[in-house]
Amino acid sequence: MPQSRDLAARFEAYSEWRRRLSSGISALHEWLTEQDLADAQIDLKVQRLLERLHQDKLVVAFVAEFSRGKSELINAIFFADFGQRLLPSSAGRTTMCPTELLYDATRPPSIRLLPIETRLKDATVAEYKNYADEWVTIPLDLASAEKMGEALGRVSQVKRVPAALARKYGLFDDEDILTAIDSDGEGAVDIPCWRHAVINFPHPLLQQGLVILDTPGLNAIGTEPELTLNLLPNAHAVLFILAADAGVTKTDLDVWNRHLAGEDAAQKAGRIAILNKIDGLWDELKPEGEVVAEIDRQVKSSAHLLGLPAAQVYAVSAQKALLAKVNGDDALLAKSRLPVLEEALSRKLIPAKRDIVGAATQAEVKALAAGVKSILDARASGIAEQLAELGALRGKNQDVVEHMMDRVREEKELFERGLQRFTALRTVFTEQTNRLLDYVGLDALRTNAGRTRRHIEDSPFTRGVRGAMNDFFATIRGDFEHAARQSSEIHDMMQAMYARFAKEHGLERFTPPPFSMLKYQKEIDRLERAYNQHFNTLWNMVSKAKFALMKRFFETIASRVKHVYDVANRDVESWLKSVMAPLESQVKEHHLQLRRRLDSIKRIHRASGELEERIVELNQADDALAGQIAAMAREIAAIDAVIERPDALPAAANG
Ligand SMILES: Nc1nc2c(ncn2[C@@H]2O[C@H](COP(=O)(O)OP(=O)(O)OP(=O)(O)O)[C@@H](O)[C@H]2O)c(=O)[nH]1
Ligand SMILES: [Mg+2]
């Protein structure tokens, strides 16, 4: 069955590439350990790198006004193998809560549902994900398509509640949202039973790290800040679905402008619009060419209205594609045009993702190798120095040897005095580090968020909420600016120290990498923009449920900000290590070498016959070192080869 063969094949190749990259990195690590060159910091870096490669996810989100065919399209692209509709898809509102499809091998196949009642509390969906007992879990019986369909049908469940309660959930408002789902006029409305669903399902693509996000139509997007502020901005691709016969309607345009029309060029590149239901335009009475021209016209005008290049708009029939795949009808499948979309998805998405992951991995491997290389180089130059010294001793008398011993001893003492300076530097470094960590610390954020929460509660009106939020962001920005200044102070201090040790003691010159807060500042800016963008629409849309919604809105933003802080803290810590660790190991290495030099001259002083023997020893050590440097270069080259020639077969497959 042609089950999205191309997409599946490319995705499989991408996973295979990640596996090869991981095994290259593991080989490098093994070699470093064997050679006694790995330390705790290297172990940690490698472990993180491998974890990241292993957990790498590709998130594709489906967004549209209700009933455009999101769920049907997901069924057609990913689940046609089941021979039937897996996700519920029917006329009217069907998917009632955001639904993630993924595979987590540590859990049994299941659908997990977060009750709508959780909207009464402040916690976000992301936070609830850490508490399994808050979710209703229904196991999936993979052997029975019927039972599976029944379990997955839960995402459509609704229940009738008094309008007042719906309002408390931030769901119902007299003039708007869920009145479309028959309010019976007696102050009761139908609301979704669930706030969020996670389907854990061992589909081959999901097993390899694909995550699909199905969303409910229009209004639910606005009332669940998790979607607008977290899930959608973090998706690698967003598919926006339209109906081919209607084109871009006013509500479509609303959804698009509110949630997807990001100015960011990179984000726009990941957006694809789909004109679904082209079968509605098929007409046996018209010449084929006319139908095609009609579809083309719709593609062009939709592209124009959405501000997308026409090449990013695809016309398909999800329903006919699903039917064609289930029946093995190749002609109908081609006519549905789904294969064109699948081809484009795999061609665009996967190489772009691979480039990003490859470049990031390569940069980390390079930094790691550079650290090891500088130790090896220092050892090599130590040996060269000793060889020169000992060579000069050939045929010299005891006096000269004594004189030389004095010189090295002096050098060693001088260096040991330099070590005091190093200890003093460590103290200053620790102070500065603590200050930096305070600025980006979770305590600072907690205080800031607490203050904002109080202000919102004290003054739950437009001006009050706006003011509180502006203060919230301004405080973060201020702290981040301090952090940026502090890290550049640390950087300058360390750079001066490296220069000094290089000049005074001949240590290798090393330029510590600078630390940039820009990434985190930009992310905060993005969140503030998202907040500004959504504030007014939310405020106007929900007149009665304002307060509950605003609070939830703030909690979502706060939890996104916390994520930024978490990442920043982790990065700051590993940067601090990368700035200090080389100096530490250089100092240690240099000290060791001075001791070795002194020892070997002492030995020669005692027995002059040892000179030649010692020179031979040193030459051997020098060869061994050159061998190590070459071997490491080979390990790195193997990793580079995987990154730079992603489609080459692994060596094992050639043998
Ligand atoms: N003729 C035709 N009907 C389609 C096509 N795709 C979907 N439909 C129908 O459109 C209706 C809505 O499809 P869904 O998949 O439920 O739409 P949705 O976007 O997921 O809607 P919500 O879950 O309510 O937000 C269903 O009856 C589908 O069978 C198509 O390509 N052609
Ligand atoms: Mg749906």
Image (cartoon, grey):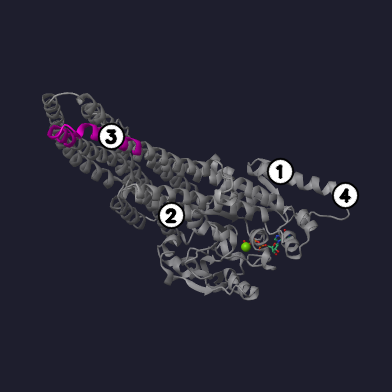
Q: Residue at x 71, y 49 (%)?
A: 340
Task: From the image, tell me which residue sits under label 4.
Answer: 287
Please indicate whether residue 46 sits to the left or right of residue 332 in the image: left
Nearest the viewer among 156 and 553 is 156
What's drawn in magenta, residue-wise? Answer: 597-624
Task: Tell me which image quadrant ligand 1 sits in.
Answer: bottom right
Label 4, label 3: how many angstroms apart (C-alpha)? Answer: 90 Å
| Residue type highlighted by circle 4 | Pro
| Residue type highlighted by circle 3 | Val
Nearest the viewer among 200 and 395 is 395
The prevailing secondary structure element of the residues shown in magenta is helix
Name the image quarter holding residue 410.
top left
Disc 3, SS: helix
Label 2, label 4: how many angstroms apart (C-alpha)? Answer: 56 Å
Note whether 80 is above or below 406 in the view shown: below
Residue 287 picture location, percent across and down: 88, 49
Residue 196 picture location, percent across and down: 51, 65
Label 1, label 2: how many angstroms apart (C-alpha)? Answer: 45 Å
Residue 254 visible in image: yes
Note whether 629 is above or below 85 in the view shown: above
Answer whether labels 2 and 4 touch (C-beta < 8 Å): no
Q: Residue at x 21, y 43 (%)?
A: 430
Task: First in sequence, mark 1 or 3: give its number.
Answer: 1
Task: From the image, tell me which residue sits under label 1.
Answer: 301
Q: Residue 51 shows which numbered tag?
A: 2
| Residue type highlighted by circle 2 | Glu
Disc 1, SS: helix
Residue 420 picture location, percent across and down: 14, 37
